[in-house]
Image: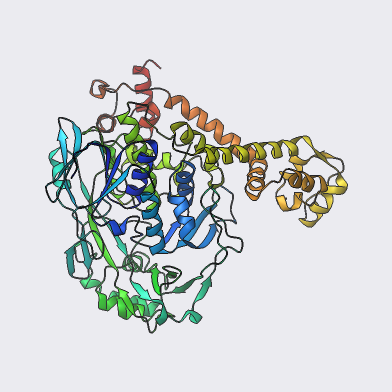
Amino acid sequence: MFDKEYDIIVVGGGHAGAEAAAAAANLGSSTLLITMNLQNIGQMSCNPAMGGIAKGQIVREIDALGGYSGIITDKSAIQFKMLNKSKGPAMWSPRTQNDRMRFAEEWRNALEQTPIVDFYQEMVKGLLVKGDRVIGVRTSLGLDIRAKSVVLTNGTFLNGLIHIGEKQFGGGRAGEKAATGITEQLADFGFDSGRMKTGTPPRVDGRSLNYDAMIPQPGDKIPGRFSYLDTKVLSRQRDCYMTHTSPEVHELLKEGFDRSPMFNGRIKSIGPRYCPSIEDKINRFSDKESHQIFVEPEGWHTVEVYVNGFSTSLPEDVQFKALRSVKGFEKVKFFRPGYAIEYDYFPPTQLKHTLETKLVQGLYFAGQINGTTGYEEAASQGLMAGINAHLKIREEEPFILRRDEAYIGVLIDDLITKGTEEPYRMFTSRAEYRTLLRQDNADLRLTPKSFKLGLASEERMRRMEGKANQSTSFVEFFRKTSVSPEQINPILDAIESNRVKQSDKMFKAFSRPGVTMDHMLQIPSVAEYVENNALGKEVLEQAEIQVKYSGYIEKEKNNADKLQRLENIKIPEKFNYKRLNSLSFEAREKLEAIKPVTVSQASRISGVSPSDISILLVHLGR
């Protein structure tokens, strides 16, 4: 059946696997995607949504690099919101509610229309390894399929164990069996593994809910989109709703705590800190009388509803009884109860920045196998693993994004240098250069890099160049053009700002707090410039940010340049840290284990102090 050798085999068809297969194939590598169920490619295993705080930036970066997630999100969206608009642009984060079934369908269609991607439905039981190099995979039917590189994106399936109250059974997702064999083989190769936990809430029948008792949560009046390409903007949207738990609900939930796998010792692994179960919230935040519940429709045409904020592994009778005491849920009917799932992961300090493993050449890990949580984090890792697997085969330079270039760079650098003992998710606070890494400029930052690789299309590049040129020219117009007191003072009066007595450059007036692009468009020469040059919404937004935040942006660029000096100091691959007696014991141990490529990476490893870095610099002749 498989007499040819593939360039790349991708194991798993979730968000990481789908992006890995698309990237590798679009770059020219013959690719085989193996998954346990072809009907579930691109499945939204948890909530039917994409983006959010920092995650929205990641989806935009994936899109700017030529990945598919942004396009598919736009095609399947039922609601769009730009979060944090009341804060600075570094915090703005796009988010969509999506049609779950359509999202998976669009992913399947996109991959089937991608040349040189083959598909096969079966479980991979193990890897074929020769010396220290992977040469293929072995399936549960005993088929050996050869490849030059393998990307593992197993999600929650590796020895997956589902918990509902005191009941537990093997599974990688509700209704799907767990994957076995790979963890044990990797352990034999010398890999360290661990267990992690995640959970999901009940799915309910929307016809049984009383929406009149809840608070509507509509989308933006003027919805945006994720992709920088010309995807269709929503002309109509579905509302979400919000309700709250109560002391009564909490008491009903507590009645099942003695049967909770979280509290009776059945679950021993750590769950995501920032997405706790409802029982964990009640236990940790005992002073709070209520918690928010978001009621999210699963699509345009289905009545199924996702109960966001009510993730739980309590017994199903306790879940049902408590949820019926939530306002608007008095007559709720369950489609299925919530559950927790434990699964194997591999501490990501065992990887290079390309996501290739240090122990086995040509083997890449992406997604939850690396201890992360979230569709967006998984998709970005899949994209980077697919790109780097392709480049490795062709003996080309690896593609690595720095911390000042992308949230994806922050994510991977955090995983490689710090590791994680609980499911890692991205936040804007994790990025020290978040003013540079905004959702609005991901195309300006990354599309040229991807175009050079051959992944981003010419259309993307042309659009990016047009936006960049128009934005730069518009900002330059503000720098060079003066505005008279007669033109600007009415605007300043309206925002209760001090008047000016003489003409000055528009850039200075625009930089004032409270002055917006809408205000500047009231000035005839500005409005005329916009009309004559046919400037779109994206260009206006980009120009406004560049004017109003120019000082912050310049400061972060300078800080990034300083960091880059340490990034340029390479550490020899076989550097012997043990001979540096001046290093602390912890630093020697961590540096020996992680083997950072640069001094900058070494400085970010937990347990490596500034004095350790000074010692390292001395021994490197710096």
| Residue depicted at 87% across the width and 43% down the height | 501
- Name the side, left or right, on which 274 lies relative to 74: left
The quadrant of the rendering that contains the C terminus is top left
| Residue depicted at 65% across the width and 50% down the height | 537
Direction bottom: furthest residue = 331
- Name the side, left or right, on which 235 lies relative to 165: right
Q: Foreground residue, 616 or 127?
A: 127
Question: Residue 208 at x, y = what percent?
Answer: 40, 82
- Name the side, left or right, on which 443 lies relative to 331: right
Question: Residue 395 at x, y = what percent?
Answer: 32, 26
| Residue depicted at 37% across the width and 49% down the height | 111
Question: Which quarter of the figure has residue 233?
Answer: bottom right
Q: Foreground residue, 594 or 191?
A: 191
The quadrant of the rendering that contains the N terminus is top left
Observer able to see residue 353: no
Question: Residue 488 at x, y = what percent?
Answer: 82, 48
Q: How many badges with numbers are in the image?
A: 0
Question: Residue 436 at x, y = what percent?
Answer: 54, 40
